[in-house]
Image (cartoon, rainbow, N blue to C red):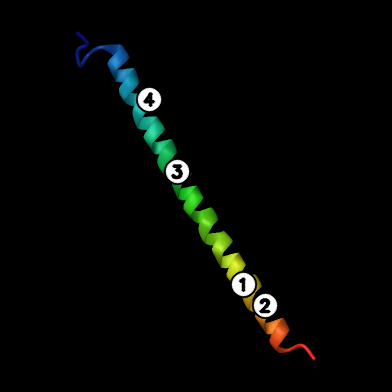
Amino acid sequence: MPTEDDPTTALERQLEKDRLQQETKNERQVWYFLAYFLFGIHVIAFVMIYAVRHAK
């Protein structure tokens, strides 16, 4: 029966904590990438709309 003072239990708890921190960081990076991507698509779309409307 593992106890609270068992080094293996402490190590598993620390590894799980580290994994959750890394997962949170990765998820935040994905949201930033998505935000920049969508912003860029809109900028390109507005430039193309401007070009089409002002073409001679």
Image spot of residue 35 (x, y percent) = 51, 60
The quarter of the picture where residue 23 lies is top left
Tell whether label 3 touches label 1 (CB within 8 Å). Answer: no
Write down the residue under mark 4: 15
Tag 2: residue type? Answer: Val
Q: Decide: few, some or many residues near mark 2? Use Cα within 10 Å; few <14, some 14-19, many ≥20.
A: few
Bin the neighbour count of mark 3 within 10 Å (Cα to Cα): few under 14, some 14-19, many 20 and up. few
Q: Amino acid at mark 3?
A: Lys
Residue at the far top: name it. Answer: 1
Mark 1 highlights which residue? 43
Q: Residue at x 47, y 43 (%)?
A: 26
User: How far separated are the C-alphas under marks 2 and 4?
Assistant: 48 Å
Whole-number angstrom distance, CA of label 1 to CA of label 2? 6 Å
Q: Amino acid at mark 4?
A: Leu
Q: Mark 1 and 2 residues: CB-CB less than 8 Å, in contact?
A: yes
Q: CA distance from mark 4 to mark 3?
A: 15 Å
Q: Earlier in the sequence, mark 2 or mark 4?
A: 4
Image quadrant holding the N terminus, namely top left
- Asked where in the image residue 24 lies, by quadrant, the reply is top left
Q: Residue 34, image x and y in percent? A: 52, 56
Number of the front mark, 1 or 3: 1
Nearest the camera: 9 or 41? 41
**Which residue position holds label 3?**
25
Image location (x, y in percent) of residue 12: 33, 20
The local secondary structure at tag 2 comes to helix
Mark-to-mark CA distance, 1 and 3: 27 Å
Q: From the viewer's perspective, is residue 38 above or below residue 1?
A: below
Name the amino acid type tagged 1: Val
